[in-house]
Image (spheres, helix red, strand yellow):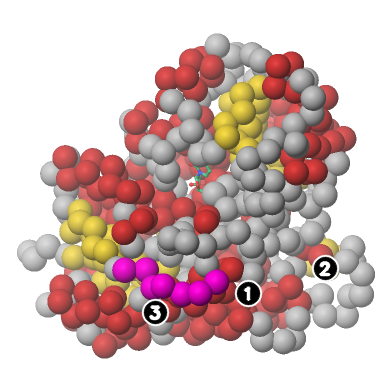
Amino acid sequence: MVQLQVFFFPVMAHGHMIPILDMARLFASRGVHSTIITTPLNAPAFAKGVQRSNDLGFQMTVKLLQFPKVDGLPEDCENADQLTSPAMFPIFFGATKLLKDQLEQLLEEYRPNCLVADLFFPWATDSAAKFDIPRLVFHGSSFFASCAGEQVRLHRPFKNLKNDSDEFFVPNFPHKIKLCLSQIPPHVRTEEETEFAKTLTEARESESRSHGVIVNSFYELEPEYVDHYRNVLNRRAWHIGPLSLCNRSLEEKAQRGKQAAISEDDCLKWLDSKSPNSVLYVCFGSISKIPTEQLHEIAMGLEASGQQFIWVVRKGTNDKETEDWMPEGFEERMIGKGLIIRGWAPQVMILDHGAVGGFVTHCGWNSTLEGIAAGVPMVTWPSFAEQFYNEKLITDVLRIGVSVGAKEWVAGTGGGNIKRDAVETAVRSIIVGEEAKERRNRCKGLKEMAKKAVEEGGSSYSDLNALIQELSLHPSSN
Ligand code: UDP
């Protein structure tokens, strides 16, 4: 049989590059030749993962496209985490549209059997169709959030609401899910077609013309919503996650995304000195930049809670190198109790450590699923994208988390003006007490299910088999 060749093309943001690298490695481990398409400054993020696969005898390659030079972006900007204001996002996505010709040259030259391209590259469906190549979409969300977002967009259940705090239910939905007006993104609330709304409309249209969607999830986690997505919204989808579980060794878990700002050894030594389930891990993903005042409130809340923590601090864009968020003497008082990582943390390695008993998360889908796969209960603190829906999955459906009370959709700031008392109450309740124990037990059950899903015969393992089988029967493969 001829070897299948699949191209993977993630948008240049770590929340998409990380799962797509895992996905490409997973395909390669099933005999597919996986090729990652990216730009020169993003290539290092893939190098180790690709090398590891090749060392195991699997076939993986990286192909580079030159990131277009456009006005309005920082110098040498090729990744969304370098954007210094929300206004730069449309410019960044606009620039990625200019990659079309270069992508098509690659497709023409190599004629892969399939192109897995990011949601943010709606134009990729037409590019692939030019060469009769099936295009699969990766949007990086849960089934739950995709279904909720679609029902809310279609039926606009918030349309007669006036005040930010006015509430509504997600219509046509298996569970009763209540949100308030301010948790809906501005581009959904408004009737105007903003630049970002236009991109999302194009993404939806291109998805409907594509071969289907690959979802980083597993059936047992959200069965009603896998079914809803397939049968009510009529989308073709394959669930093949949790993708992070393809990282089995300590090294693989520690070296995802960027170079960590702490050595593996130092981090593990710190964690090893703590008792089981006693440490909170606090991290808001790869993009959020938390304003100074909010960092200050988090510090005060963590200290008042009396809980031990690892806190990944990404500073706001205006406070450069200053540490004016830090309460006086905070770091000294926290020696042995709280570890601050300034920059990138080895997240999956930390979450998988037995000492970690809670995860304060912005509810990005990768982080959420990594928390679930590690069996760790969560304090939910959503801010933008589909994070408010993921929060509801965690707190109301799976009942493995406590909300800190964020109510306002704000792009990229991960703030929400949450006071220290709310932080203190939420973090304490996730570690201490009877309910915490029950939550932890539910988490253990989900962790086991996640592991089974990716093992031979499991739901995700089988869905990936079905997808590879289908691609090998596609006319483009014969
Ligand atoms: N991540 C990490 N270390 C950090 C911050 C983030 O390893 O210090 C990883 C995290 O494990 C996850 C991804 O970056 O895989 C973030 O994706 P998510 O969907 O949670 O959030 P986003 O960054 O897209 O908002």
Q: Is residue 385 left or right of residue 17?
A: right
Image marks 3 and 2: residues in contact by CB distance under 8 Å: no
Q: First in sequence: mark 3 or mark 2?
A: 3
Q: Is residue 87 left or right of residue 117?
A: right
Disc 1 on helix, strand or loop? helix
Q: Residue at x 72, y 69 (%)?
A: 185
Q: Residue at x 33, y 62 (%)?
A: 39
Disc 3 on helix, strand or loop? loop
Disc on res. 98: 3
- Residue linked to disc 1: 150
Which residue is situated farthest in the top direction here?
273
Q: Tell me, yes or no, whether the highlighted magenta stretch contains residue 67.
A: yes
Is 382 placed above or below 282 here?
below
Q: Residue at x 23, y 84 (%)?
A: 132
> Is residue 443 at least partly visible in the picture?
no
Tell me the kind of residue under disc 3.
Answer: Leu
**Gap between marks 3 and 2, in whole Å?**
36 Å
- Pick whichever, 130 or 14, lies toward us: 14
- Residue linked to disc 2: 181
> Is residue 344 at least partly visible in the picture?
yes
Q: Which quadrant of the figure contains the N terminus? A: bottom left
Q: Residue at x 68, y 62 (%)?
A: 411
